[in-house]
Image (tube, rainbow, N blue to C red):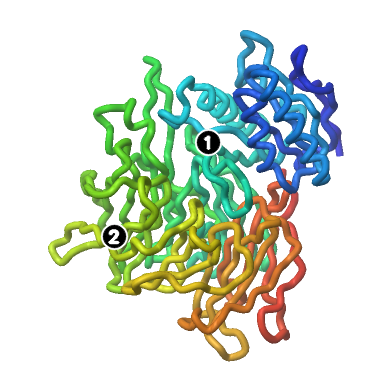
Amino acid sequence: MMATTGRRTGAPRGGRSREAGTADSGRSQVLIVAPSPAEAALLMAEAGGAVSVAALCLTGGDAEGRSAFARAAAEAGHQGARADDEASILPSGADAASAVLAEIRALGPGRVLTTGADQGPGDPDGSHEAAALAVFRAVEAYHRETGRPVFVDCRTPGPHSPAGSGAGPRYRLPSNWLVRGNDGRLSAYLPTAGAVLRWTEGAGGGWSGPELLDAPGLLPGLTVAQGPDGYVRLVGLRRTERGDGTVATEIVCATQYQTGRPLTPWHELGNPHRAEPERGRFVGLPVAAFDDDGTLHVFVRNDEHTVNTRHQRDDGVWSPWRHLRGTKTADEMVAMRAPDGTAELFVRLRDISGVARWSRTAKNTWAEDPSPENVHAYPGTLAAAPEVGALRCTYAGTGELCQWQWGAYGPAALHGPDVAARVAGVTGIDLDGWLCTVLASTDRRGCCLVGFHVEGRHDAGVWWTATDQWCLVPPAVAPDRHGRVTVVTLDASARLTATRRAEDERGLVLEPWSQAGPRS
């Protein structure tokens, strides 16, 4: 295998010059791109599982920030990662995107950690946006040059998560990113800058990919929704810089009809603030869900921190945007199917602890329901349960994993281990003659947890199994064509790693984890 060499992008205060390793070792590299060493220090905590971490900063920052970075690098070293004790600093006047591209070429990282674009008041001097845009442009250029995918993870300072991090995601990843197509084969979808990464199960059960599904301008967040027809809709945000210097941010949607086949072109759904593009930059990541009749509903948090929605009927016609006035919402929404077969929306509230719900009325309007206010979800943990009308989260007051069922006064604890991420799940799994719900998440070490309970009886207890598989992203779970549970995640090198329920075993015994084929 040919080794790729290159010199680190450096500056007088930058770190050591270093040559890139082989392509295989490069995939275990993490590159941090931040406005200054202080922000890079925060991102260093998100680089768990890497064998090597490099940092590139737009400015040298102050002495306190450089000391914070040195401490973060030392902590990464204690955890087994190689990290320079100083970040590389971009020379004054240098083109940031070109410098990031040169660094990616030299290191060949599996992922890039950076800040988020379009954060509004959260980024008063625009430095977070400058770092993020440099990464987006560089990664898209690298994709065009090499065809090798790089996973982009945007973070923004926020409250500590259950896993102990002080930086939350700017663009949420899909919770149900593993789906089974009409032919029975599984597909996995995750976003990166300017593309969607897709892995596809083969006829013999192995995996191919990731393929880069080109989507210029796509921000690294995604919603994956599967309709009653079995087709998969991908919904995201696309950011386009116009020739006059303005920025257009639009909700876009594409459809996967057949497993492994090309996506449809991305369809523009516009923006609730289309007449005011500057406000439209600050919308949240859209979510989507289907009614039983095939109507697709898309929801987005607007610049006022309330919600807008529009829907597509089964004949393909889209409605205008509708404003759902109500309480202020955080950047955490879950769209799913209600017990009556219609779509509903749950949002974590911004200004007070609690969750609000919007549902359809008999007059085909949307109404806010305050009944889930007793669901005090920890930020980043709100997720749809596989049971219809059920919601899961980590309870903010106790740190316990909980489930709220439609109509209940409050959530019920699942009495599981320390769960540190959203929980994915699937129902209808036959385990030794019992129909069960299977759950997947990560513990505080970042390793995959798998559990199950008898369907509809989560109150009777959940049986959990801890694994040693470290997860770059929260795992996803789905049944394969034979009904066997399949769990997938990305390992530290951003490669798809999967396991299935072992045959001829009682209970939920998993096969050894295996990686998808090498990235090409």
Q: Is residue 497 left or right of residue 299?
A: right
- State if disc 1 and disc 2 touch (CB < 8 Å): no
Question: Is 225 located above or below residue 327 in the figure?
Answer: below
Question: Is 496 located above or below residue 456 in the figure?
Answer: above
Residue 399: image location, x then y, percent: 55, 61
Q: Is residue 289 left or right of residue 261?
A: left
Residue 28: image location, x then y, percent: 77, 43
**Which amino acid lies under the numbered mark 2 shown in the image of this protein?**
Thr
Residue 409 in which image quadrant: bottom left
* Picture disc at residue 194: 1
Question: Is 339 located above or below residue 230 in the figure?
Answer: below
Element assignment for label 2:
loop
Q: Of marks 2 and 1, which one's residue comes earlier in the chain?
A: 1
Residue 320 visible, this orientation? yes
Q: Which residue is mark 2?
A: 295
Numbered label tally: 2
Q: Residue at x 74, y 72 (%)?
A: 511
Distance from the alpha carbon under mark 2 to that under mark 1: 28 Å
Depth check: give the residue in front, 158 or 437.
158
Residue 481: image location, x then y, percent: 57, 74
Residue pushed farthest top? Answer: 93
